[in-house]
Amino acid sequence: MDWKPNRHSHLTIQEQIVDWIKSRIEQGDWSVGTKIPTQRQLAMEFNVNRSTVQLAIDELKADGFLESKMGSGVYVANNSWNALLNRSQPNWQQHIESSIHKPNYHTIQLINEYEQMDQIIRLGTGELSPELLPTKQIEQSLKKISLDSKEIGYSSPQGSGKLRRILCNYLKKRGIQTNPENILIVSGALQALQLIAVGLLEEGSIVFQELPSYLNSVHPFQSSGMQMISISRDKHLADTLRTLKRNRQSLFYCVPTLHNPTGYNWSIEERKYFYNVCKELNIPIIEDDVYHELLFESPPPAIKSFDISGQVLYIGSVSKTLSPGLRIGWVVAPTPVIRRLADIKMQTDYGSSAFSQEIVAHGISSGLYEKHLIKLRKQLKTRASFVEEILEQRFKKIATWKKSEGGFYIWLRFHKPVVNKALFLKLIKKNVLINPGYIYETRDLHHIRLSYAYASFEELNEGLNILLELIQQ
Ligand SMILES: Cc1ncc(COP(=O)(O)O)c(C=O)c1O
């Protein structure tokens, strides 16, 4: 041992001894179980006071590097390597737990994990089955798209001008008159919600929503410090909102067409009443309209279509109709809002994928998108009828549901509160994945969001059988 502490170091003698012993352990010179020299020997080697060595050893014992064995001496401890690892890594768990963004519910984390497994039957997935995706069409359109080198650079903050012009035209069919300046292309509707959460609301603002709500399964507003208030749209809506809002900033998030998770639709009267109440109280509306093209009958007009005062922030996306992997959505809103959201988007990701924007622009402008939608609605309707038939035959005694009007979901209500985490986990063991109602409304133990859009017919049949079996048990 030819090491000695440096008396001119900025570290104390004790600190240097601690570091030196740790380096012995780290380099494997003193492996686990090694008996270290006595305090007297070390003090002599280092040419320091024995009390200094004793303090250093006490510190190493407290940190788990060394341990005393009664009457035998001091040894390198069993968990000295853990102690070393912890020392060399920041405490990530503490970082994670104290960070701003909320974690997903454990159930949703499991859903995300199990959705990747081939053998799993996905009874709840909010995504089109691979066989319903227009993969061939997209492949062919890729051959037809001629890219201008300008188009594959960073796009303008609001997204491709071409796509925004095409969308203006497309949205006319939804009754929405707008300009390219009033459109922002986003990386999916979810990003639109995130941008609104961080760009338009002060901390502590209120976000009104209906229950159950898609917003309870993702946390863009909750993580930005907004207060979520769930209310029902009855005849007291105006009074309820007035009382709750007081002087605070607020907005109302809604999915009036093919609501997620219930699949319900608001009538035109309900839409107008709701719009007028929010306008009177000066509460901006977020109209999330990502499912409207999947309504089996023609959809009622968007709330945005009667918005003359810039009250409505309208959100669309191709995730539910064309491909969620393209990550293309849009927001239609007054110009200052669009500029603000575009500014944050540029700070977040420098714009959505240029290729994806070109694919969507080509799909819509060539009419291929609408052709695909016609076919898709038929396929989804067949799937919905198939599942409804099974429910009619096997679930009638234990559950109720409303006939699907379009989209992906049937909001299946069991008479008894059986849809708990235990059921969810038991189903996973049987390779069946469901979206339980409690991820959309915490206290709900009656519902399952049944999706007929993803699993194959055989899987739907088998998965529903397993579900029935377990619930009857
Ligand atoms: C109502 C609603 N809004 C937004 C989204 C997110 O869509 P995107 O994939 O476009 O981000 C979803 C997806 O499930 C949804 O159901």
Image: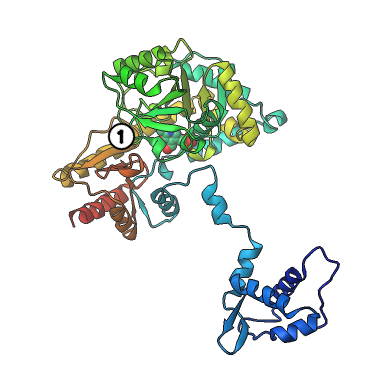
Residue under the point 25% across and 40% down: 412
Residue sitting at the far right: 8
Residue under the point 60% across and 23% down: 340
The answer to whether residue 353 is visible is yes
Residue 470, image quadrant? bottom left
Q: Which residue corresponds to mark 1?
A: 262
Image quarter of the C terminus: bottom left
Q: Quadrant of ligand 1?
A: top left
Residue 166 at what x, y percent from top left? 55, 21
The answer to whether residue 299 is visible is no
Left or right, residue 250 beside residue 166: left
Q: Which residue is at the front of the view, 304 or 118?
A: 304
Amino acid type of the residue that numbered disc 1 sits on in the rendered structure: Thr
Residue 288 at what x, y percent from top left? 43, 27
Left or right, residue 159 beside residue 197: right
Left or right, residue 113 beside residue 79: left
Residue 353 at what x, y percent from top left? 61, 35
Against 157, residue 473 (above or below) is below
Image quarter of the N terminus: bottom right
Color encoding of the figure: rainbow
Q: Which residue is at the front of the view, 259 or 145?
A: 259
- Total marks shown come to 1
Residue sitting at the far top: 308
Q: Which residue is at the front of the view, 87 or 127?
A: 87
